[in-house]
Amino acid sequence: MKSAEARRPEKARCLVFTAPGQVKLRTEILRREPGQLRVDSKLMAVSHGTELLAYRGRLPAGLDSDETLKSLQGPLSYPLKYGYSNVGLREDGRRVFAFYPHQDRFYIDPDQTVCLPDGLKCEDAVFLANMETAVGIVHDLAPRLGERILVVGQGVVGLLVSALLVRSGVGLVLAVERYELRRRAAADLGCTVLDPENGDVRGRIFELTGGRGADAAVNASGSAAGLQLAVDCLAFGAVLVEASWYGSRPVTVNLGTAFHRRRLIVKSSQVSNLDPALTGRWDKPRRLDLALDLLQQMRPGRFVSQRFKLSEGGKAFALLDKAPENVIQLVLEP
């Protein structure tokens, strides 16, 4: 006969967006499906873009979370359990990364986890999802040796894109960022940093690019102003990769001048898919393996700026919402 302890349901704590401006810690019963293994979370990274949209009530109605991830299936509607950067210890002793919401323990299919190298710290591994996103953005951009590239927005994704571009051998990476903390991080990577609120930034970009404008650009700012700046500062025939997701917010861009006459190309980048031009050689597992290797080389854990307990989720999102100038990467500990 089983003991009372053995019969007691196993529980987990998780963060749930319940309404705009409201995130609650909830307890739920764990259920193991055949073949699944338990993971005890060690560190979780907040997605400052998508999750802030959820916190602010700006997610588009009727859209599914992510059809490619089993842990995130279902509509983007309240109450919403979300998140996709979770590093933990699997019950077989392996440290793993999982695309799983902010929860202190969970059961998951083993093939839905990524086993981590022994020398990779949790603080670095928790950037895997964003590193994969950054790799996809650079693949979509397809920069050439010696080009001058503009990256608008130096949040986590923008910083990782800038770091990859600096490593790739392009001639110059121009990083535009309004917050001083993030500008310093971009400067440390080797970028030429510009403050969009200080002086004639457009004129400075053309000056630094020999009057031609940027050879290519990435907008990772999540703002219409950032998108407009990128469009206005591109050279003839250049490509702009829009890496932001705006949720339900409408975006207005003036396409009547630079865009039309310079024959510019604007393309979206989304990590769930690859550029169709690459699919003969690349697939998602290969891209993920590359992102994992880059984490070991680049050690992005230095971008962690704040740590909160899972129980402090409301406080963490309030900081991200009201004082983003003080944040690069916010992480949660169980």
Image (tube, grey):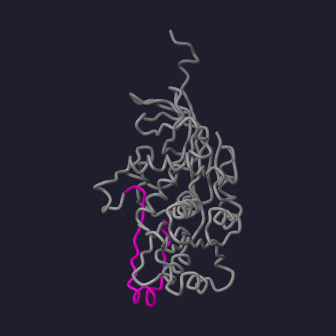
Which residue is rendered at x = 45% and y = 49% of the image? Answer: 290
Say whether residue 125 is visible.
Answer: yes
Residue 329 lies, with reference to residue 216, above or below; the image says above
Tell me if residue 275 is in the magenta stretch.
no
Which residue is rendered at x = 40% and y = 37% of the image? Answer: 111
State the residue in front, 208 or 312: 208
State the residue in front, 50 or 265: 265
Relative placement, left or right, of 12 versus 65 is right
Say whether residue 322 is visible.
Answer: no
Image coordinates of residue 167 in percent, x first then y, are 53, 60
Image coordinates of residue 275 in percent, x first then y, are 35, 62
Write the start and end of the magenta stretch as one range: 244-273
Q: Check the picture and name the quadrant holding the C terminus.
A: top right
Which residue is rendered at x = 56% and y = 49% of the image? Answer: 297
| Residue that sits furthest to the top in the current view | 1
Relative placement, left or right, of 275 versus 83 is left
Q: Count the marks.
A: 0
Residue 5 lies, with reference to residue 326, above or below; the image says above
Tell me if residue 265 is in the magenta stretch.
yes
Q: Main secondary structure of the magenta part?
A: loop
Image coordinates of residue 260 in percent, x first then y, are 40, 88
Relative placement, left or right, of 68 versus 153 is left
